[in-house]
Image (cartoon, grey):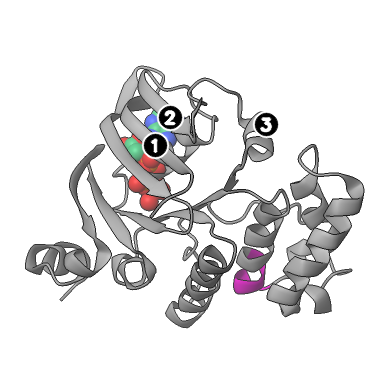
Amino acid sequence: MSGLRLTISDLSSGHGQIRVLRDISFSVAEGEVSAIVGANGAGKTTLLSTIAGLIRPTGGRIVLGDRDITRLPAHVLPGLGLALVPEGGRLFPFMSVQDNLQLGAYGAVSRRESASRMEELIAIFPILGERRTQLAGRLSGGERQMCAVARALMSRPRFLMLDEPSVGLSPLMTEKVLDTVTALARRETLGVVIVEQRVTEALEVADTAHVLDHGRIVQSDRAEVLRNDRRIQETYMGL
Ligand code: ATP
């Protein structure tokens, strides 16, 4: 696959004195869906938070296209084409759906562009059109996740990172959210990094996948290969 890449090289990071991630390397291309799977506490949230500029890495590099973004603060990254959907969505519950969406465009696209982008996204997520004037806090789990994804897409990112989109969702709703995101990746040639504990669902939609275990990537391959790997099935998929 050609085009822009998001490349992580030898990344190390943690919380204060606690070292969580060690020498993480992987890359994702535009239009590609990559899954980072692993058990509770493997370091998945720490990884996305570090890439998104919320935690300062202790070593390694993060490069978007030909630009080193390793030490850039979180707020400039959406403007450079990298957006994060945090775990649980983190919407503003006392603001309407459309005001939450509007915030995703803040500082990244003009007001006029943001109005047309919102209409585009509402066409993709029609339920958000039906709920546009309702408070985000009144959305169901699935609708909330859709709204959080749409909010991140308001800035027209080239790469989208999702932190455990399945949290609080039924398997069916998880599948729906993941399918929509995958369709978007194809349609907008968007690079996607999905961090998931629900390994079966994530490997179902991803092109490539990486297994994170105790802060290290222990296996990387095409998702299809990992899906059929006996050890992955036994350890992570309950088969
Ligand atoms: P989960 O699925 O539970 O979110 P995860 O794979 O996302 O797990 P992280 O949340 O990145 O894992 O946590 C990795 C390790 O870092 C864990 O041992 C956790 O206890 C520790 N940790 C996470 N956040 C902090 C923090 N703010 N301060 C100190 N340690 C933390």
Q: Mark 3 — residue?
A: 75
Q: Residue at x 52, y 26 (%)?
A: 69
Q: Which residue is mark 1?
A: 7
Q: Position of residue 111 (x, y in %)?
A: 90, 48
Where residue 132 appears, x then y in whole percent? 84, 70
Q: In the drawing, what numbered circle is on residue 62?
A: 2
* Quadrant of residue 206 within the rendered picture: bottom left
Q: CA distance from mark 3 to mark 1?
A: 19 Å
| Spatial separation of the CA atoms under disc 2 and disc 1 | 6 Å
Furthest-front residue in view?
Answer: 2
Query: Residue visible at 44% across and 43% down?
Result: 5
Label 2, secondary structure: give it: strand
In space, the residues marked 3 and 2 are separated at their CA atoms by 16 Å
| Quadrant, the C terminus | bottom left
- Asked if the residue at tag 1 contacts the one at tag 2, i.e. Cβ–Cβ closer than 8 Å, the answer is yes
**What's the residue type where badge 3 is placed?**
His
The residue at the point 57 percent across, 67 percent down is 184
Secondary structure that dominates the magenta span: helix
Region rendered in magenta? 140-144
Dot 1 beta carbon under 8 Å from ligand 1: no
- Point out residue 149 in the picture as x, y percentages from the top left corner: 62, 60
Q: Residue at x 54, y 30 (%)?
A: 53
In terms of secondary structure, where does tag 3 sit?
helix
